[in-house]
Amino acid sequence: MTNSEYQVEAARTMPTYNSIEARTHALLGLVAEAAEVYDAMQDSGAAAVRHTVLECGDVCWMIAELCTAEGLDLFSVVRATTPAKMGDWLEIMGHVAKLCGIYQKAYQGHTIDYVQVGDAVRTIWADVAGIAECLGATMGEVLDANIRKLRARYPEGFSAENSMHRKAGDL
């Protein structure tokens, strides 16, 4: 699955908001999902690897939502990404916080610098790719697993009911 195909598939399962609400949802979701990756990485064993890969996919979902809300093509934003080395998770959270800070400044009257947004998104994407690589997965596998999960959860597109009442094992 290409990044562009992923963005289209992910958009099918996103809540319908105006662009400001979608941006806010994506940023809040990105922070939450990055924390869930961290939590999943604290466990060990095959189930923990699968859980971490699925949570990495959710980080990608939030990035895709942000790009969609901003009218950005995910492929164009992340195309030059190479996987980062898996290092200190605080570095990854730092990149997420930097991205949130760019948008926070918009509420203080600053213009959003989309070059900085692209740089932050690319770095987070590379961080996720590095985690996936260390776990023996490719980004294609992460994206495919995420879309399979989202299709199963939201067969007719996003619904609050399906979000709140998930089937057993739906992470």
Image (cartoon, grey):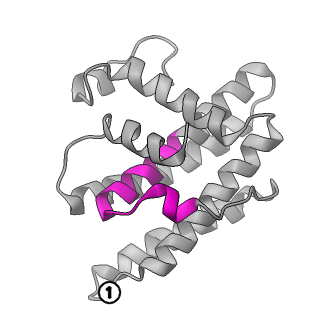
Q: Is residue 46 above or below residue 18?
A: above
Horizontal side of 120 relative to 163 (left or right) equals right
Q: Is residue 36 above or below residue 65?
A: above
Q: Which residue is mark 1?
A: 111
Percent across and percent down for residue 73 are 42, 59
Q: Quadrant of residue 22?
A: bottom left
Percent across and percent down for residue 51 are 64, 28
Percent across and percent down for residue 125 are 61, 56
Queried whether the magenta region covers residue 64, the answer comes back as: yes
> What residue span does the magenta drawing correspond to?
58-78
Q: Quadrant of residue 91?
A: bottom right
Identify which residue is drawn at 25% across, 40% down.
Answer: 15
One can see residue 84 in this view: yes
Horizontal side of 24 relative to 54 (left or right) equals left
Identify which residue is drawn at 49% across, 70% down.
Answer: 99
Q: Residues within 10 Å of mark 1 (few under 14, many from 20)?
A: few
